[in-house]
Every structure is written in C-alpha cells, then in structure tokens.
Amino acid sequence: MNKLTLFLFLIGIVLVSGCADSDTGENIEKVKEGDYVKVDYIGELEDGTIFDTSIGREPLGFTVGAGQMIPGFDRGVVGMAVGEEKTLTLPPGEAYGEYSEEQIQMVSLEYLESLGIFPAVGDKLGPQQVLVMNVTDTEAKIDFNHRLAGKTLIFKVTLVSIGQE
C-alpha cells in the first residue's frame, strides 16, 4: 500500500468509526432577530409565585426583535436552539419598568361614567388591568402602572420552534 492509499484508508476508518466530531454545532439553527419563534414558558416572581404560563395552552409565538415582547424576554431567546431550556431573570428595567407614583392619577367619575365605567375600589379596568385604588363622590384614584411593574421576573423558557407560525 502506498502512503496516499494508507492515508485515505485511515481517514475513512476515522470517519466511519465516529471518532471525528462531524457535528460542531454549526449546523444547529439558532434564534436570531427577525425569526418567528414559539416558546413554552413559566413566569415566576422572586418568591416563586407563578404569574403566567403557557403550559397547558398553545406555545407563545412572536417575532424576535419586533417589540411584541418585554425587552429582556425578547433578547433572552436570541441564540437558543429548538428544544433548549433557559432561565431568564429580568430586572424591572428589562420587564415592565419601575413602579412610578406618577402613574397614579385622579380621573373624574363624570368622564369614566361617560365611557360606561362605574368604578369601585379594587376593580381592574381595561386590557392593561389598571387598578382602582380609591373612589370619592367626584373622582377615582387609578394606578396605571402595570401589575408587574417594579418586580424582577423569572422565566423558564423552552424553545419549541423557529420559523413556523
């Protein structure tokens, strides 16, 4: 056997035996900005209270970087591969922002009633679930902060798919 034949024979044995690492991970598709993804998640507060989850429902689908998600969640899935699990710990600035006293406002009852809203203390109004804190004869004190403002959020995320709506 000449040296070239021996060399090719040995290379063949290495490749067939699996000793060569043919999967360096470069062929695995990973999430990048602009991708449509689906994820399963569990959202918890620092004390372990679950505030939201997709478990038992359809996975959450969104376009990465399109502003459909809170910033830390959006950035947190970049680089993930299908099937990968990751825990994202998001401080308020990466989630729903800091709690702001400026977001507590007095709104006239006349205005609210013209919209068909008759508030009572503890009511959560509208899609954002703003909280009625107090009601007088003429005004309602309403907290327009998101209910998760000022909180650190922990998401356990599993990437289900990339690019499939």
Image (tube, rainbow, N blue to C red):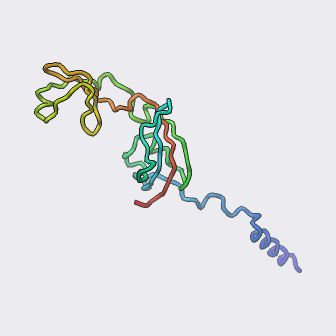
The outermost residue toward the front is 56
What is the quadrant of the C terminus in the image?
bottom left
Q: Position of residue 112 (x, y in %)?
A: 15, 30
Residue at image coords 19%, 28%: 119
The outermost residue toward the bottom is 1
Residue at image coords 44%, 44%: 53
In this rendering, is residue 19 above or below 75? below
Quarter of the image for residue 102 reads top left
Q: Position of residue 86 (x, y in %)?
A: 55, 45
83 vs 62, left or right, is right
Q: Nearer the viewer, residue 99 or 120?
A: 120
11 vs 3, left or right, is left
Q: Position of residue 163 (x, y in %)?
A: 44, 60
Q: Position of residue 149 (x, y in %)?
A: 38, 30
Q: Nearer the viewer, residue 49 or 89?
A: 49
Residue at image coords 13%, 21%: 138
5 vs 31, left or right, is right
The outermost residue toward the top is 136
In this rendering, is residue 111 above or below 76? above
Residue at image coords 38%, 49%: 66
Quarter of the image for residue 109 reads top left
What is the quadrant of the N terminus in the image?
bottom right
Q: Nearer the viewer, residue 18 or 137?
A: 137
126 vs 25, left or right, is left
> How many numbered circles does the render carry?
0
